[in-house]
Image (cartoon, rainbow, N blue to C red):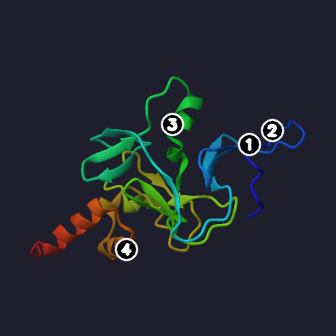
Amino acid sequence: MTPMPQPTTVRSAETRLPVPVQFSTTVAILRNGGFHRLVTVRPVAEGEQLFHIEGRPGREPDRYSVQVGEDIHLNPFDAPDADDQTRRAPWQFMNHACEPSARLQGTDVFALRDLSAGEEVTFNYLTTEYQMAEPFSCHCGSPRCLGRIGGFKLLPEVERERLRPWLAPHLARLLAREAALPPA
């Protein structure tokens, strides 16, 4: 992957370079062709914290929420316009990947491996979301791609077990409760 342009790069009609919007010392939002994604602005070591997410708590999932507890979903803060929305909740542009580059632990995001400058920051939605408000078809390209992403609830047992090391605490507790139940 080619290095990302510096955050101070100005979009030029001649070059058509996307302009990253930096929101932390490690991550920026890259807008390109109507799509947004998070990318690193410098090399990041495995285990390093990338950023912290904040949002408006809600009980139900929606398209942009992140589940951080059994009945707690963080939604982007309400904002008067799209630019303010982007500044207040840049984490909403962290895309899904079946083999992600980052992991959500509570409300902190950590690198799962060493990341190069300009590399996309992704996480596996199935490690936090019990049931997706809007299931979608994944096109991450991973050999382990599950195809349809609908939530942890819909995964076969073998996939639930494979994801166990990266599960958010609320899903790990659910898995432990299910394991304690007698077979049907």
Q: Are marks 1 and 3 in contact (CB under 8 Å)?
A: no
Q: Which residue appears at 35% of the width and 55% of the height?
A: 129
Answer left or right for 113 relative to 11: left
**Which residue matches tag 4?**
165
How many angstroms separate mark 3 from mark 2 (CA)? Answer: 23 Å
Question: Crowding near pointer 1: few (<14 within 10 Å), some, many (20+)?
Answer: many
> Does residue 79 appear in this view?
yes
Q: Position of residue 95 (x, y in %)?
A: 53, 53
The answer to whether 23 is drawn above or below residue 141 in the figure is above
Q: Position of residue 42 (x, y in %)?
A: 68, 60
Disc on res. 19: 1
Report helix, strand or loop for mark 4. Answer: helix
Q: Quadrant of the C terminus?
A: bottom left
Report helix, strand or loop for mark 2. Answer: loop
Q: Amino acid at mark 1?
A: Val
Q: Nearer the viewer, residue 50 or 34?
A: 50
Q: How many marks?
A: 4
Q: Are marks 2 and 1 in contact (CB under 8 Å)?
A: yes
Residue at the extreme right: 14
The answer to whether 125 is drawn above or below residue 175 in the figure is above
Q: Quadrant of residue 73?
A: top left
**Which residue matches tag 3?**
88
